[in-house]
Image (cartoon, rainbow, N blue to C red):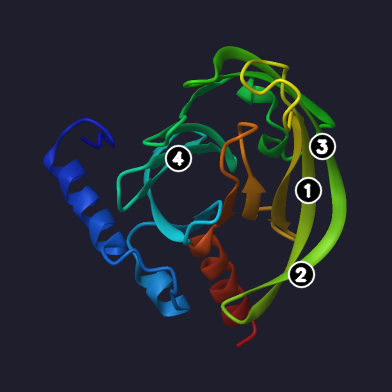
Amino acid sequence: MLIISACSTTTIAYYNTLKLALQDNAVDYTVEQVARSKADLMLVKAGDRDAASLALAYIDEDRYRWVSADKVIFTTHHGIIVETEGLKNDIFFTGNLQHNPLASDDMLAFDWKRKIDISGVGFGLAITSMWKIDGEVSHTYFDRPIPLIKVVETVSFPEYTPFIDVGLSWENTYFLHKSTKKLFASIQKFSPEGDTYEMVYLSRIVREISSNEKGAE
């Protein structure tokens, strides 16, 4: 059973709204469809599987919980996956979130040490990552070019059974809007043999598009 918050008429009504937003698992949205959605929408592609829609179900301070039509939940902290529910190997915990480089409005931190718990893998796993700004790029969303800053995180995973000497380092990539610094997309994973998740924040992008087009009138 999916629990978004305390069981109440308001919660049930809101979850029904999420189900309506995701009922056909649509991934080919228009600007108008995203703008009309009562819940923020995200597009996620996991590994080689088809893309799927997620809706923002709950905000707990800096933690955003996104739910899919089949009730998989991703919890993100400033865009980084810190918890999941419903995957084969869920991430249960991510520590030291106060030093998440994407959580700061100041200069990007160069490194981030944290411990994570992953089901079927281990607990208290010490992760180190190095961060850098890798220039500016332009991505096209809804047929509009969007200027972005590319940020690369190089992750080092500890030598730990069953992943000894197998893919213990990889890169996660984050794309922030050039002006607002809001995260618009990312490509990330949290385990050596886990899926890579390509995530696109549709509602944020549509709000940016709408704001720019209104300002141009």
Give the camera-side residue of 207 and 41: 41
Say if 217 sits above or below 20 in the image.
below
Q: Position of residue 76 (x, y in %)?
A: 52, 38
Measure how far apart labels 2 and 4 are at the Cα level.
Answer: 27 Å
Q: Position of residue 37 (x, y in %)?
A: 35, 66
Q: Secondary structure at mark 4?
A: strand
Q: Position of residue 22 (x, y in %)?
A: 31, 61
**Residue at the spot of label 2:** 138
**Residue at the spot of label 4:** 74
**Residue at the spot of label 3:** 131
Q: Amino acid at mark 2?
A: Ser
Q: Secondary structure at mark 1?
A: strand
Measure how far apart labels 4 and 1 are at the Cα level.
Answer: 21 Å
Q: Residue at (76%, 24%) from the top-left corner?
A: 165
Describe residue 96's horizontal placement relative to residue 147 as left or right: left
Q: Amino acid at mark 3?
A: Trp
In the image, farthest residue toward the top: 124
Say whether marks 2 and 3 touch (CB < 8 Å).
Answer: no
Say if 22 sits above or below 160 in the image.
below
Q: Quadrant of residue 150?
A: bottom right
Neighbour tally class for label 1: few under 14, some 14-19, many 20 plus, Cα within 10 Å: some
Q: Secondary structure at mark 2?
A: strand
Q: Amino acid at mark 1?
A: Val
**Residue at the spot of label 1:** 151
Of pointers 2 and 4, the one earlier in the residue sequence: 4
Q: Amino acid at mark 4?
A: Phe
Describe residue 135's horizontal placement relative to residue 50 as left or right: right
Say whether marks 4 and 1 touch (CB < 8 Å).
Answer: no
Measure how far apart labels 2 and 3 are at the Cα level.
Answer: 20 Å
